[in-house]
Amino acid sequence: MLHRSWILLLSATFVLVTVCYASNVQVVADGFTWAENLIFDGHGSLFVTDAYRGNLWRIQPDGSGNFTKTLHIGGIKRFLGLAVSEDGLNLYAIAADQNSKCLVLAVDREQPNTYKTLASLPKMGNGLALNFATQQLFSPTEGDFIPFNGEVCRIDLNNNNAVSVLDSGLTAADGGWIDQRAQLLYVSNVLDSNVMVFDVRAG
C-alpha cells in the first residue's frame, strides 16, 4: 500500500543567504554551463553533471591542495540525476539521449565513457535516489510541467531493472532524497509548493 504525506512550504519562494569569508572558500572546479547533480563516491571523487551540455565530470584532489577536473562522460544530451551505491562502487545516472529518450544508466566510476543502459523511463526524470536496503532507484518526473502529469518512477535493480510507477498525478515532481534509516523518500512537488513523503520499505 502506498503511503504518501506532504510537508507544506510556508512560502512558494525561499531565499537562502550564506555568508562566507573569502579566505574559507576554494573553487575546486569551474567552466560549467549548468553545474547540477553532485555526488561523492566515498573513494576520493566528486562527480558533477554539466546538465545541459550533457557532460559528467570527475573532480579529484591532486595531492598538492588543488583539484583536477576530468571529463568522465561526454556526448549525452542531458544529465538529470545521479546516485551512488552504499559502498560507493556503483554510480547511476538519469540521462536524456540525443533522441530525448530518458535512460537510466549504470556508469563505470573508473573508466571514462563506459556505461550501460539499465532501463528507459516513460517520462523525463529529474533527480535520482537509491534505496540501499531494497536496491531500488527512484526518479521523480516533472511531466513537462503539465498539471497532474508528474510521476515518481521506481527501477528495481534486483528484478531485471523493472520500471514501475510509485505515484502519479503529481505537479512537476523534481528531485528526491531517501532517509535510509527511516526508509522514507522525500520528493519536491515544485508547482504545488510542497514536499511529499513516501514510505518505501520493502513489501
Image (tube, rainbow, N blue to C red):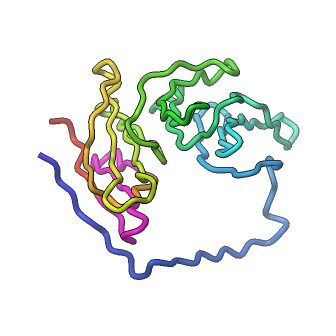
Residue nearest the viewer, comparing 87 with 98: 98
Q: Is residue 115 above or below residue 23?
A: above
Residue 124 as seen in the image, left or right of residue 29: left
Q: Is residue 62 above or below residue 128?
A: above
Residue farthest to the bottom, as pictured: 11
Q: Is residue 166 above or below residue 191?
A: above
Q: Is residue 127 above or below residue 132?
A: below
How far across and how far down the image is residue 163, in percent? 31, 30
How far across and how far down the image is residue 35, in percent? 69, 50
Q: Answer whether residue 188 is magenta in the image.
A: yes
How far across and how far down the image is residue 52, in percent? 67, 46
Residue 16 as seen in the image, left or right of residue 75: left
Residue farthest to the left, as pictured: 1
Q: Kindly identify the residue that appears in the image at 65 percent across and 38 percent down.
A: 47
Residue 139 as seen in the image, left or right of residue 203: right
> Image quadrant for the C terminus?
top left
What residue range appears in magenta? 176-196
Q: Kindly identify the residue that appears in the image at 63 percent across and 18 percent down.
A: 114
Residue farthest to the right, as pictured: 64
Q: Kindly identify the residue that appears in the image at 61 percent across and 46 percent down.
A: 38
Q: Answer whether residue 78 is magenta in the image.
A: no
Q: Kindly identify the residue that appears in the image at 34 percent across and 54 percent down.
A: 149
- Main SS of the magenta part reads strand
The quadrant where residue 136 appears? top left
Residue 195 as seen in the image, left or right of residue 19: left
How far across and how far down the image is residue 15, in percent? 58, 78
